[in-house]
Amino acid sequence: MKNSKIYLSPPHMTGKEQLYINEAFESNWIAPLGRNVDMFEKEIAEYVGAKGAVAVSSGTAAIHLALSLLDVKRGDRVFCSTFTFVASANPILYQGAEPIFIDSEPESWNMSPLALERALYDAYKEGKLPKAVIMANIYGQSGKMDELMTLCDHYRVPIIEDAAESLGSTYHGKHSGSFGDFGVYSFNGNKIITTSGGGMLVSNNEIILEKARFLATQAREQAIYYQHHEVGYNYRMSNILAGIGRAQLEVIEERVHAKREVFKMYERLLADVDGIDFLAELPETRSNRWLTVFTINNLEIAAEPFEVLKSMTEHNIEVRPLWKPLHMQPLYLGTPYYSHSEHVDVSEQLFKTGLCLPSGSNLSEIEQVRVVNCLKESLKGAKRKEGIF
Ligand SMILES: *Cc1c(COP(=O)(O)O)cnc(C)c1O
């Protein structure tokens, strides 16, 4: 009998989602907007400690709105983490602007302050500073926000914090996504909480958030007839999906706890394997451990990550490579890029040596033991194939 499939980070319903959906049905307030949307916005803002929030159709839409609100136009520059999902950067292209990618640093795997400093300095000298810096907080770990923010403040460049993967994570006690001029969350199916699809834009500037709501509803003006001065988008979240989000948000702390437990269990069960380095939690941060991720130290293990991935996939276990850096993507070929230091490309190294393990908050202990046993076997098998030892 074939073992059932173990997914990377599947949706984890609470059972209470239906209550909020029913509320919307009973009032016949299905779409778009309504009480669930208003409440979901309030509840997220309260949870992360932001003044306000705007619920939208995806995390990508939230990033796009943030760029629009910062008046990013054709020919403008925007800096962006290179070690992230493509959705962090694509809205730069939607605006006709020019991305410049910034490498990671080795401790948090997030934006390198050294690379950012060089990039900002060069841009300043050219008289063409970026209109925004998009910083991703990857796999639930916050970047080195103090250093990064000091640099952006110095050059007065606004920050868009892509916290799509890090809802519930903190840095010095403050929520990931609440540091930048804008914060972005995603409720895509595999994120720590989900609305099946959706996103949130947060900020401490309520006037700007009102403008975000306006742009997200086709930039339709207050008039008897349909009146428009600007290009808008159809980006608002439906009242049904916001209902799912409200039930999910009620258990966010439990979900963070469960994901952290999944991580601890991997750490314990793999303690006897030399050469596996997990993404560390920076001091004074709490990671939501959205995914348990690690790199293989090839001085100790000869296993090639993609061989390990193939072997585990054959056993019906979903394992993924780490993000392929955006400066290596065919889509972004030729885009300027600043590495961590002159001779060290942290993100390229991570991509070549790392993997993501199944990390659902609903992953059972039995499933996790199966993943670990399969990983240990795959590491050995891949080693034999390489024939290095
Ligand atoms: C998931 C994700 C997004 C995109 O969110 P969607 O809701 O799927 O549009 C953006 N950035 C990062 C880092 C993500 O992981």
Image: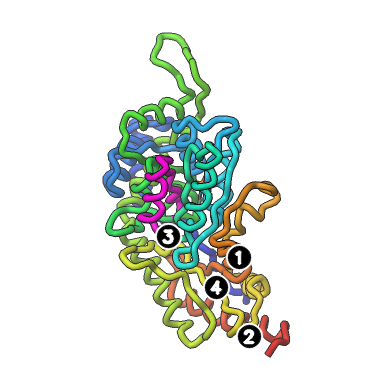
234 left or right of 93 in image: left
Give the Cα separation between the discs numbered 1 and 2: 32 Å
- The residue shown at (54%, 82%) is 275
Q: Residue furthest top?
A: 224
Which of discs 1 and 2 lies nearer the camera? The answer is: 1
> In the rendered image, is residue 93 in sight?
yes
Q: Circle 1 sits on which residue? A: 343
What's the distance in space between the residues labelled 1 and 4, CA to CA?
20 Å
> Sequence order check: which comes first, mark 3 or mark 1?
3
Q: Which residue is mark 3?
A: 140
For mark 3, give the secondary structure.
helix
Label disc, if present, on residue 380 of the rendered structure: 2
**Disc 2 or disc 3, which is closer to the eye?**
3
In the depicted view, which residue is nearer to us: 198 or 354?
A: 354
Circle 2: element type? helix
Residue furthest bottom in the image: 389
Region in magenta: 141-165
**What residue type is disc 2 on?**
Lys
Q: Earlier in the sequence, mark 3 or mark 4?
A: 3
Task: Say above or below: 168 vs 183.
Answer: below
